[in-house]
């Protein structure tokens, strides 16, 4: 048991050999280098008296195993020296000169408990420490990147990422279902043309709400129906708006007839030749123009008789039943006259028409025809297929 011994003589501390138990140890040269006690408690007392005569101070007791102080106890170093703690001859921990506590053994127990694997130390907020399991760790992204933009980086485990709605975008959250909804606030995204090409020019939308206006041109109407979201473009003229029609009517050596409007009318007429011999009918050289609205046809019929010699033939029906014609020939005769005759003499050549026919003897014979009383036609007498006689007027004035 340690003995509580008080040393009152200062010389004993100086290392007197008279008190072998209570001296500073000396080296081989006799220099003191330590204070040694045997089976005793070292008591350090810094007691003093205040102005009232009362003793004040603190006591520190130390033996080979324990150091006890009844006042604030400071254990430290000076002059930038580290403070070490060791057990079993091995350094276990230290305080560095810059204030760090370095646990050299990398081991720690709390009230004798070293904790379980993967546990961490936590505080209850009142200075009480204990081991606890880590909370469930979910996989999370520490960085959010967008092409061409700066990277958003989490600054801590509890950091918050904010979503900001841009133009035309709305963002709603559902805390009960842990859901975020991002939608277009302009009625939803749609496929739309930004550029409309027309007539070699491009119409480009200036914004997402820009409007393209359709303007009706000449003879065109535009109507819209907001209920069915339709636009109707129609021709405002009557008739078929897509028909193929000629704007110009041209004739060789004649003026071109040009339509003045889409509903213009072309009139087809027949005219007489006023220079014609007055002995003939006024409409003899005209044609009949007949229209049929039901069949949408125009018929042009000639008023010139089929027997008119200007066609050069007399119509006949051959043995084979084919319509044909016998050519009319000029026939000249010398007729006595008292008028002056070119080259002299008393005869003049007179012209008429004849029809060359083959008689029963196989000889071609010119058939002459008498003049009608109007002196404008020749008359051909024929026997038709029924055996009846018929006279055909052959107009040969041309």
Image: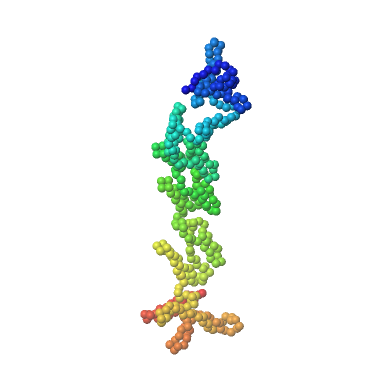
Extreme residue in the bottom direction: 361
Residue plotted at (56% across, 20% down): 19
- Horizontal placement of 14 versus 374: left or right? right
Residue plotted at (53% across, 83% down): 333
Q: Can residue 262 be seen in this view?
A: yes
- Horizontal placement of 342 versus 379: left or right? right
Relative depth, front residue between 191 and 289: 191
Relative depth, front residue between 146 and 17: 17
Relative depth, front residue between 70 and 387: 70
Extreme residue in the front direction: 18
Extreme residue in the right direction: 29
Task: Please tell me in which quadrant of the rendered image residue 11 appears.
Answer: top right
Q: Where is residue 18 in the image (x, y as percent from the top left)?
A: 57, 19
Q: Where is residue 170 in the image (x, y as percent from the top left)?
A: 46, 40
Q: Can residue 389 be seen in this view?
A: no
Q: How many labels does the image show?
A: 0
Image: 172 above or below 302:
above
Relative depth, front residue between 360 and 145: 145
Extreme residue in the top direction: 52
Image: 342 above or below 238:
below
Image: 82 above or below 172:
above
**Tell me, what colour scheme is on the image?**
rainbow
Q: Position of residue 27 (x, y in %)?
A: 60, 27
Residue plotted at (43% across, 64% down): 297
Residue plotted at (56% across, 11% down): 51
Image: 16 above or below 217:
above
Q: Where is residue 315 in the image (x, y as percent from the top left)?
A: 44, 78
């Amino acid at each position: 048991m340690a003995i509580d011994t008080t040393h009152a003589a200062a010389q004993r501390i100086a290392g007197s050999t008279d008190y072998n138990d209570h001296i500073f140890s000396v080296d081989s040269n006799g220099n003191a280098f330590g204070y040694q006690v045997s089976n005793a408690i070292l008591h350090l007392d810094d007691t003093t008296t205040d102005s009232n005569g009362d003793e004040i101070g603190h006591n520190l007791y130390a033996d080979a195993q324990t150091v006890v102080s009844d006042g604030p106890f400071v254990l430290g170093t000076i002059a930038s020296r580290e403070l070490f703690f060791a057990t079993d001859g091995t350094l276990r921990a230290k305080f560095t000169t810059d204030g760090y506590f370095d646990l050299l053994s990398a081991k720690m127990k709390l009230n004798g408990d070293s904790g379980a694997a993967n546990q961490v130390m936590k505080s209850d907020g009142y200075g009480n420490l204990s081991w606890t399991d880590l909370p469930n760790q979910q996989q999370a992204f520490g960085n959010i990147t967008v092409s061409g933009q700066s990277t958003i980086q989490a600054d801590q485990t509890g950091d918050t990422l904010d979503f900001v709605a841009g133009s035309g975008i709305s963002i709603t959250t559902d805390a009960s279902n842990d859901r975020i909804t991002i939608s277009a606030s302009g009625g939803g995204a749609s496929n739309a043309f930004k550029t409309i090409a027309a007539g070699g020019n491009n119409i480009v939308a200036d914004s997402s709400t820009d409007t393209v206006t359709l303007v009706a041109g000449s003879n065109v109407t535009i109507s819209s129906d907001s209920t069915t979201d339709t636009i109707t473009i129609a021709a405002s003229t009557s008739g078929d708006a897509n028909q193929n029609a000629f704007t110009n009517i041209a004739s060789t050596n004649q003026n071109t007839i040009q339509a003045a409007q889409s509903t213009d009318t072309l009139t087809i007429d027949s005219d007489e030749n006023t220079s014609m011999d007055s002995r003939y009918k006024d409409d003899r050289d005209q044609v009949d123009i007949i229209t049929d609205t039901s069949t949408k046809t125009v018929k042009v019929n000639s008023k010139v008789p089929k027997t008119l010699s200007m066609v050069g033939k007399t119509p006949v029906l051959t043995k084979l039943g084919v319509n044909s014609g016998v050519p009319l020939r000029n026939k000249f005769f010398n007729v006595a006259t008292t008028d002056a005759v070119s080259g002299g003499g008393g005869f003049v050549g007179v012209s008429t028409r004849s029809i060359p026919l083959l008689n029963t003897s196989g000889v071609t014979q010119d058939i002459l025809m008498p003049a009608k009383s109007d002196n404008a036609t020749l008359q051909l007498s024929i026997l038709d297929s029924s055996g009846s006689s018929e006279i055909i007027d052959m107009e040969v004035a041309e």
